[in-house]
Image (spheres, grey):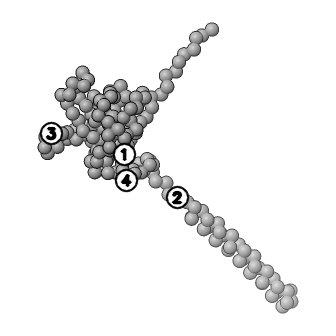
Amino acid sequence: MNTEERKHWISWMATIAEGVAGVMAVEGGVPASQSVPDPGPSRRRHPLTETEKRIIEHQGTEPPFSGRFVSFFEQGTYVCRKCGEPLFRSEDKFDAGCGWPCFDDSLPDAVRSIRQNSGQRTEITCAHCGGHLGHLFSGERMTPKNMRYCVNSLSLDFQPAPQPVIAGHMS
Ligand SMILES: [Zn+2]
């Protein structure tokens, strides 16, 4: 290999090395910029909106007759909007005509009731996460259980009951 050939060979090798480095840079850079860390199961519920935060975290009340569950009577389970814990059964829901979804019972140990300072009203919260649900009234004689859990629709999510399997006639 003479001097001229050697120079040519060195420059050719440098070109190859540059190309390899470039590919490595691309390979190293693209996945890093595209990778999104997994938020983990506890944070996968979609985040609360500002309105939901005002009600659930700051004891707000949605306007009457505005919620999606006021006139909703499908079979299933009502769960906490914030944490997803089951709170009420559709079997216990009744139409109180007050503008909010009402139940005359909750699932066992799912709802905490807190007598407010005035003693006039009892706040109800999710026993699991403490999220505000609404208020509990008793003695109104609207149902035989004589209780009314008056809940903001925005504090709830709904899980429909599985459709019953209707057995066909065997032939
Ligand atoms: Zn909750």
Q: Callout 1, which amino acid?
A: Lys
- In this rendering, would 32 be left or right of 85? right
Residue 149 picture location, percent across and down = 27, 34
Q: Quadrant of residue 118?
A: top left
Tag of residue 82 = 1
- Tell me the crowding category of disc 4: few under 14, some 14 to 19, or many 20 or more residues within 10 angstroms, Cα based: few
- Toward the viewer: 87 or 34? 87
Q: Earlier in the sequence, mark 3 or mark 1?
A: 1
Residue 155 picture location, percent across and down = 34, 42
- Toward the viewer: 156 or 108? 156
Tags 2 and 4 touching, CB below 8 Å: no
Could you tell me which secondary element the residue under label 3 belongs to?
loop
Between the residue at mark 3 and the residue at mark 1, the CA separation in whole angstroms equals 27 Å
| Residue that numbered label 3 is attached to | 120
Residue sitting at 41 percent across and 48 percent down? 42
Q: Earlier in the sequence, mark 2 or mark 4?
A: 2
Between the residue at mark 2 and the residue at mark 1, the CA separation in whole angstroms equals 24 Å
